[in-house]
Image (cartoon, rainbow, N blue to C red):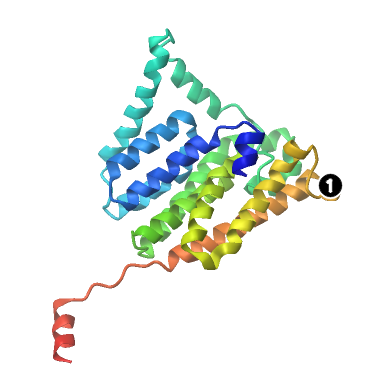
Amino acid sequence: TVFINSAVWGQSDAFFAGMGVWFIYFLIKDKTLLAMVFIGLGLSVKLHMFFILPIIGILFLKRRFNLLYLLVPFVIVFLTFIPGYIFGAPFLMPFKQIIGVAGTYSAPNMNSGSLYAFFQNLNNLGKWRDAVKLFGVPFAFTILIVFTYVFYEKKVAINEDSLLALGTLFSFLTPFLLPHMHERYFFMGDIFILIYVIRNPKRFYLLFVSQLASLMTYANFILGGWFFPSIGPSGNLMIAASLNVFIIANLTYDILKIVEKPEITTLETSEIQQI
């Protein structure tokens, strides 16, 4: 999908996906400031960098993140506006552009393997579209908050394994839950799943599942037809969405196994020494 997305389709998703990888890398290295710089650089390209930001909520609950760091991405994004200002762009134009992109699409699903693929036949129903537009984003944020709290409550450890797993999970879960998603919006997930599989070779099959899910949604644009023509767009997109559910379930299971080790009290240490 990297080749198809960039060289064939001419899309720029690799830029923000790359920034997402660096964000996780510097979190692993405990360099939060640099991690937030790359969040800002990613946001300056596309708002899709928000997909993996629920990690910050978990770090905050674990007291591993100072909220003042949230200022860094906004500063970085503003700095990227400066060349435009130098060449005469109105001050508010970049902000209007970012806000405008967020409200461009009204269809609940734009050929993606998201939750709304299961309701693809309702795409053109006016009341359904209005309901999704009103409640879709709050619903997605609610589920993301639930996942964040569950990981905190289950005492998921913060280490190299969990940070990579969380980045991979949210790069799939967030676009799966949000409405108005395009087929390309799982691109960052395709990148993260490759890194995840390299570190967790027993999960090698997830790489093929993610590629199949993406290729099934890309096919209509690239090939001019669906993977399985007989079941139409709804059938193809529901299969892709089901594959993404499978990935999300596997990653969630893996994360819940990365728990904090119980602290040994002074009394327990003394008893161990006596033994």
Rendering coords of residue 206 (x, y %): 59, 60
Most foreground residue, 239 or 207: 207
Residue at left 75%, top 49%?
Answer: 236
Rendering coords of residue 51 (x, y %): 48, 43
Rendering coords of residue 54 (x, y %): 42, 47
Residue at left 38%, top 33%?
Answer: 40
Rendering coords of residue 41 (x, y %): 40, 32
Most foreground residue, 142 or 104: 104
Which quarter of the rendered picture does the N terminus lie within? top right
Task: Tell me, yes or no, if residue 90 can be seen here.
Answer: yes
Residue at left 66%, top 43%?
Answer: 112
Which quarter of the rendered picture does the C terminus lie within? bottom left
Question: Which residue ends up furthest to the top in the rendered image?
Answer: 88
Task: Tell me, yes or no, if residue 181 can be seen here.
Answer: no
Answer above or below: position of 6 versus 144: above
Residue at left 69%, top 42%?
Answer: 218
Question: Which residue ends up furthest to the bottom in the rendered image?
Answer: 275
Most foreground residue, 79 or 260: 79
Q: Is residue 9 left or right of residue 91?
A: right
Element carrying mark 1: helix
Q: Is residue 86 left or right of residue 266?
A: right
Question: Which residue ends up furthest to the right in the rendered image?
Answer: 230
Counting other residues with Cα less than 10 Å from the Cα at mark 1, is it few (<14), some (14-19), or many (20 or more)? few
Most foreground residue, 123 or 84: 84
Answer above or below: position of 257 versus 90: below
Say which residue label 1 marks: 229
Q: How many marks?
A: 1
Q: Quadrant of residue 149?
A: bottom left
Q: Quadrant of residue 162?
A: bottom left
Answer above or below: position of 241 versus 90: below
Q: Identify which amino acid the numbered label 1 is placed on.
A: Pro
